[in-house]
Amino acid sequence: MNGRAVSTVSGTVVHQSPRFRDQQTRMTEKADKQRSPQAETAEVERVTADTHRSERPEWTSERAFILSTAAAGVGLGNLWRFPYILGDNGGGAFLVAYLIAMVCVGVPFAALEIAAGRLAHGSSVTTYARISRLAGIYGWGVVLLTLVINSYYFVVTGWTAAYAGHSLAGGAPDFSTFTQGYGSLWFLLAVTAGVGVVLAAGLAGIERFTKVLVPILVATVLGLAVYGLSNGTAGETVSFLFRPDMGHLGRLDIWAAAFGQAFYSLTIGQGYLITYGSYLPRGVRVVRSVGAIAGINVMVALLAGLMIFPLVFRFDLDPAAGSDLAFKVLPQAFDQMSAGAWVAPLFFGLFFFAAFSSCIAGAKVVVAALSDRWGLGNRSAVGLGMAAIAVLGVPSALSYAAPGWQVRGQPVLDAVDSIAGSGVVVVSGLVGAALLAWTLSGKRWATVMERTPPKVSRAAVTIGRWAPLPVGLLLAASWATG
């Protein structure tokens, strides 16, 4: 009809010229650009997660999410690993590098992982599979990495249970004596069974456990820190921790260790944050929650240092004793203390429950992936996941038992931790952040990070996109020169 389009609205014939159609197109595009953040969020979630949202449980509150997620990292990551990594790397200089790595890279990366889990409402495998098939393979790699870390993490948690029990019965055992039998293996199986019981109760079981645990943990470690400073060498401890030799900050190995510890304690690159974020209810401020989680991590790490090092210096022990610091060095201090009979069981009891909470979170990553991938019920997925962890944990357990299994001259557990505990975790975190940050536009990330200032969400995305390359180069240079 002379180049005009015809449409019918309510029975009326309307003639539209090409010029009019162009105007309508421009108005539609303008409306698309001006869509509210709430509309963007609704669209993204409708496309990616509508079929999963109604079936997936949620945390009952932001507080429950923060406590559960913080508990995942404050266990062995801050009570066992942080003090000995700090001791190995000279104290204060490492602490400065650790805080920089935590704030500038760790927190933004953690925010991206939690927001991605919230958006996809699925496990690590499900979340990355929605990016691409190749990313989905990486998601399985994350689950496998966490499974490997769990395999020795559960063994060390068993040690804390054994030491807590022995301390109550009359004194912590000598570590070499303890590892002459098969105690490591039996306690591995006991911890696996205990974690299975908690996970079988579902998300509510995790909430109930961590709501009680975290306040008690913080209060106990604070009390032990006050005791350590009062009865140990406080001056030397303060100097060791808070008067850094800034010249050491030029050492690449310190920065590599700092990024490794920041990623380890925040559980970046291990699937914990994506998995826990997938149960996040609407209305929770992601960045604020991450800030609280990081704050709890740093606080517990510093309190652990203030708790342990005064006793180490008082009894002239070696602060660079490595992973043996908690199980070989500290029992010597407790034996020489007048109040050691009650300090030792309190310390190792705290140690056990904190480590146990991390085991719960790590196992949940594996269980959620199995459940999402094969549609298993919770109890079936828990049974399969616990069996896998126990089987993989046997070599690490037997490396500190009568057989004394080794790899290239060192116990299997130490070899696995040296590979997976720092290097692979950091690489995984860098790859994951890049995949997530480049997948969605900055505007869409801002909608997922609800009620967060746009500048903050854009900064997190920018860091996620561009930080992996320089951090990766720093780590490569450190490993090449180390």
Image (spheres, rainbow, N blue to C red):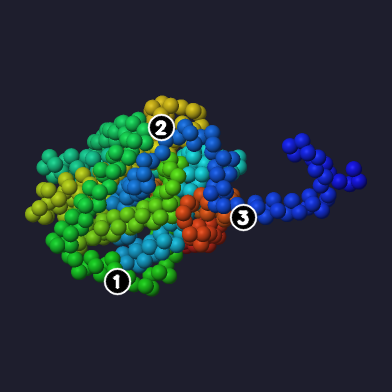
Percent across and percent down for residue 186 are: 27, 33
> Is 426 left, or right, of 163 in this rendering?
right
Visible residue check, residue 393: no
Q: Neighbour class for label 1 at 10 Å: few (<14), some, many (≥20)?
A: some
Cα separation between marks 2 and 1 = 45 Å
Mark nearer the N terminus (2 vs 1): 1
Observer-nearest residue: 366 or 399? 366
Q: Neighbour class for label 3 at 10 Å: few (<14), some, many (≥20)?
A: few
Residue that mark 2 sits on: 385
Q: Amino acid at mark 3?
A: Gln
Percent across and percent down for residue 419 are: 43, 49
Q: Amino acid at mark 1?
A: Arg
| In the depicted structure, whether residue 200 falls above or below residue 145 | above
Residue that mark 3 sits on: 34
Visible residue check, residue 220: yes
- On the rendered image, what quadrant is the N terminus found in? top right
For label 3, the SS is loop
Q: Amino acid at mark 2?
A: Gly
Q: Quadrant of residue 353?
A: top left
Observer-nearest residue: 194 or 121? 121
Q: Residue at x 39, y 30 (%)?
A: 382
Look at discs 1 and 3 and give the one toward the viewer: 3
Asked if disc 2 and disc 1 are in contact, CB closer than 8 Å, the reply is no
Residue that mark 1 sits on: 243
The tag on residue 481 is: none
Percent across and percent down for residue 100 are: 41, 64
Percent across and percent down for residue 449 are: 48, 52
Cα separation between marks 2 and 3 = 46 Å
